[in-house]
Structure formats: C-alpha cells, structure tokens
Amino acid sequence: MAKGKESILLKPNLVSFSSSDTTKPTVVEALAILMKKAGKNVCIGEASCASWLNTKIFVKGLVCSTKDHKNLMTIQNEVFKKLGYIDVSEKNDIPLVNLHVGEIAKLSIPDNFVFKEIYIHESLYNTDMICSVPMMKTHILAGVTLALKNVGIGTYPGLVYGSIRSAVHRKATEFEPTGTATAIIDMVKANKIGLNVIDATMAMQGNGPTKIAGGKLLKMNLIIAGTNALATDMVAANVMGFEANEIDTFKWAFKAGMTPNKIGDVQIIGEHPDDVRRQFKKPQMLPYNLLQDWYGPPC
C-alpha cells in the first residue's frame, strides 16, 4: 500500500470544532505513529468548515462562508486546537497543514463532471499518498459521509471556494440535485487517495453530519479500512444499513468508471458485515436548492 510512498498526508474529517462530529485524534495519531515508524514523512491536513469565528447565531444555518485569508487561518487553527490535534502534532512532531490557504495548484481534468479545472492545496498535489480518515456518519445531502466525501468535499480550499463550500454545492446543482455527489467525484479524481481508514468507534446516524443539525451518536467500536475509497465506503455504508443504490455519490462514481460496482466484488478480511451491521436512522434527504439559503451565506 505505502511501498514507494515517502510522503503521506492524513486527512481527518474535522467539519466543526465539536468532538462529537469529527474524527477522533487518537485514531489519526495511531496511524501517524505507524507510518513514521515505517520511515514515512507524515503530515495532517484539513480544511474545516466551521469554528467559533464563522458560527453566527444570527445567520441562517448558523455557519457563514468566508474566503478571507486571516479568517481561514483562524478557523483552522481553532479547530486543530479545540479537537486536540495541536497536542498530537507537538507530541509526535507531525506538521499540521491548513488546506484552505497557502500555495494552490490548478489542475485540468477534462472528463470531470462539474469542475474541468479544479484547485487543490500544494500539499495535496505534492504528497505521494493521501490517507482519508473520516468519521462514519450520515449526511442530509450525501446520505453518508465517509472516505470519498471526506476528500471529495473536504479539500476544496476556502481561499478559492469559501470555507463551507457553498459555491461548490451551487455549481454542482447544475448537474444533479444533491449539489454534492458530482463535486465529490471531481475532487477525488484530483487527489492521490491510497488508503482509507473509517473511524467508526463512535458513529452518527439521523440528520448528520453534525449533532446541531440533528445527528445522533451511535457506538460501533469499529475501524473499516481499505485501499480503494469506493470499495471501503460501500462496505461501510452496508454496515450502516444502506444499499449502494441509495447513495448518489456511488452512482456518480460508477458513471465516472470507478470500481467496484457491487459489494460482492469486494474482498473483505476480518469481521463480516452481517455480523456488525446496524440499521442506522437515515437522514431526511433534501435537494441542495431547498437548503442553499441556509447553507453558508457570506460572513
């Protein structure tokens, strides 16, 4: 998996500054230590949506969107600090990378669905491999948010697209109503995902991806890992009680030529999904155009 890969960027899902909504730092720390012991250069990168700075009780949806460099620095620093990632960084000498700001690479991907030209942080462009480390959660736009969405939405840099990616969702609605699935696949194709480790120690069901949105925590005591992001997500969604055809991200991944096309083609080692499956409470799915007035108005 990591043979020949000297630099690895770990991408947790730190959507907010609440520990109930985010990848546990202990999971990311354990991965980082293993990789460092194997001689790899490791960093942790994220482009979080919200901190106290852009959470405003007087705006629709509570969270507003910003492209301001100073604000994006503060948002990410506060999220890293609040969730314990600065402690992990200092304890283990692991750099933290703010994927919102800095040098940005522009990529041309002509067969993308939405963004034929797409912008990513130079750390993503230059790394040998990305390890997606999401928390297992449901999502009112995507159905589930796992390894694909963690990178596919969570690496659009705020400097270009805004901190809560409302511009990304609006553009994607020109192609499909979720405003999410096509944008996920476009960004996944721009990145080098080589490992996926889903933190399902504590999962979220219902109207995720946050408790404030209506998500409810569910203890699972699982880690689901794989080298293929789509396959890993399909197994995780199955464990959550979803069929593959319920998840729009999977449908668009298939349209993009990604494989596998069915869970029966996935080689599963360890626990069998039937033995650990829980029927998650499903989110109340809404098309983005019904949410856009509430989703990331400008700060």
Image (cartoon, grey):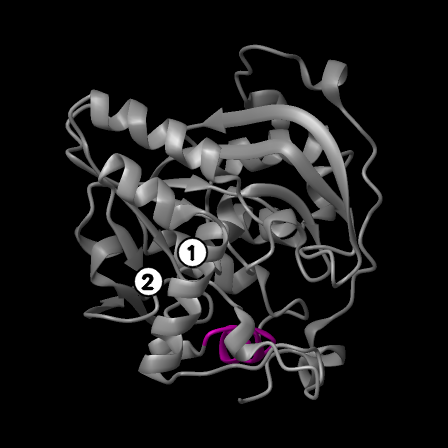
Relative horizontal placement of residue 11, taking residue 233 as reference (left or right): left
Q: Quadrant of the N terminus?
A: top left
Q: Nearer the viewer, residue 162 or 192?
A: 162
Across and down, in percent, residue 190 comes to: 32, 56
Q: Nearer the viewer, residue 206 or 286?
A: 206
Relative horizontal placement of residue 245, taking residue 116 as reference (left or right): right
Query: Magenta stretch?
Result: 163-174
Say which amino acid is labelled 2. Leu
Q: Secondary structure at mark 1?
A: helix
> Any magenta on residue 96?
no
Say which amino acid is labelled 1. Lys
Q: Earlier in the sequence, mark 1 or mark 2?
A: 1
Across and down, in percent, residue 154 comes to: 46, 59
Residue 1 visible at all: no
| The quarter of the displayed image where residue 100 is located | bottom left
Q: In percent of the image, x 46 and y 27: which residue is there?
A: 226
The residue to which callout 1 is attached is 81
The residue to which callout 2 is attached is 99
Q: In percent of the image, x 32 and y 66: which residue is there?
A: 110
Residue 246 visible at all: yes
Relative horizontal placement of residue 13, taking residue 94 as reference (left or right): right
